[in-house]
């Protein structure tokens, strides 16, 4: 590889990193339907999904690092297509996540491009335990976010809580969903305050 090729790959790779910064500004638009005026960002959702995924993986005997990696990249395509709520998907045809990802990393270092495309392909197409757990992490994060919005006074979030909980598959996700529905937003600090 020439110095020119390396510089182009470096620029393409950094371009991808810069593009991912848009996830820190992009809002999860489905929450607007529930009346949430200032919903979480896509990056905030993805970060907690990765943490929840690692926790669920530990409970389910899956690879926590793999699940966290899958969860980290699961919504990266939304820099280009936005966060389209399920009701909106009914009216538009959107490119598959694998195609969006291929376009995003087209100019990146070949190893980076192939690695990211493989992660997204696995998340979208595999039926491994890690993928099952990563999908449950996405749903559980959405359910917990819905519970938080409920406690903040957005009653329409109940529909998101119910619909995402109904999609959970792993025993650990179901257990944690049950526990989450009995807790307040500030419950976590009671461990310290006891």
Image: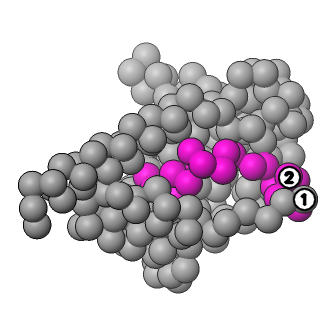
Question: Dot 1: within a 10 Å radius of its alpha carbon, few (fewer than 14), some, or many (20 or more) residues?
Answer: few
The residue that mark 1 highlights is: 91
* Magenta residue check for 82: yes
Q: Which span of residues is magenta-colored?
A: 71-90
Q: Is residue 114 left or right of residue 182?
A: left
Find numbered disc 2 in the image and state the secondary structure of the residue it sits on: helix
**Quadrant of the image occupied by residue 138:** bottom right
Which x, y percent locates residue 137? 54, 57
Visual colour scheme:
one colour
The residue that appears at 40% across and 59% down in the rendered structure is: 105
Find numbered disc 1 in the image and state the secondary structure of the residue it sits on: loop
The residue that appears at 78% across and 49% down in the rendered structure is: 85
The residue that mark 2 highlights is: 88
Q: Residue furthest bottom?
A: 127
Which x, y percent locates residue 52? 47, 50
Q: Is residue 38 left or right of residue 140?
A: right
Image quadrant containing the C terminus:
top left
Q: Is residue 120 left or right of residue 61?
A: right
The residue that appears at 38% across and 47% down in the rendered structure is: 16
CA gap, disc 2 and disc 1: 6 Å
Closer to the camera in the image, 77 or 36: 77
Which x, y percent locates residue 86? 81, 55
Circles 2, 1 touching at the beta carbon (< 8 Å): yes
User: Total marks drawn?
Assistant: 2
Image quadrant containing the N terminus:
bottom left
Vertical order, 144 against 101 (above or below): above
Vertical order, 67 against 158 (above or below): below
- Residue 67 in view (yes/no): no
* Magenta residue check for 15: no
């Amino acid at each position: 590889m020439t110095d020119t090729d390396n510089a182009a790959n470096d620029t393409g790779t950094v371009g991808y990193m810069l593009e991912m910064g848009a996830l820190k500004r992009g809002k999860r638009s489905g929450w607007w339907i529930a009346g949430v005026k200032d919903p979480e960002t896509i990056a905030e959702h993805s970060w907690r999904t990765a943490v929840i995924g690692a926790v669920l993986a530990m409970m389910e005997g899956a690879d926590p690092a793999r699940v966290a990696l899958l969860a980290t990249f699961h919504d990266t395509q939304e820099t280009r297509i936005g966060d389209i709520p399920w009701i909106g998907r009914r009216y538009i045809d959107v490119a598959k996540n694998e195609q969006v990802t291929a376009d995003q990393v087209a100019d990146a270092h070949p190893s980076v491009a192939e690695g990211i495309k493989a992660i997204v392909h696995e998340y979208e197409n595999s039926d491994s335990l890690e993928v099952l757990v990563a999908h449950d992490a996405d749903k559980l994060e959405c359910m917990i976010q819905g519970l938080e919005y409920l406690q903040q006074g957005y009653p329409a979030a109940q529909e998101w809580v119910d619909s995402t909980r109904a999609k959970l598959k792993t025993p650990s996700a179901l257990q944690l969903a049950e526990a989450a529905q009995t807790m307040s937003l500030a419950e976590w600090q009671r461990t310290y305050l006891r």
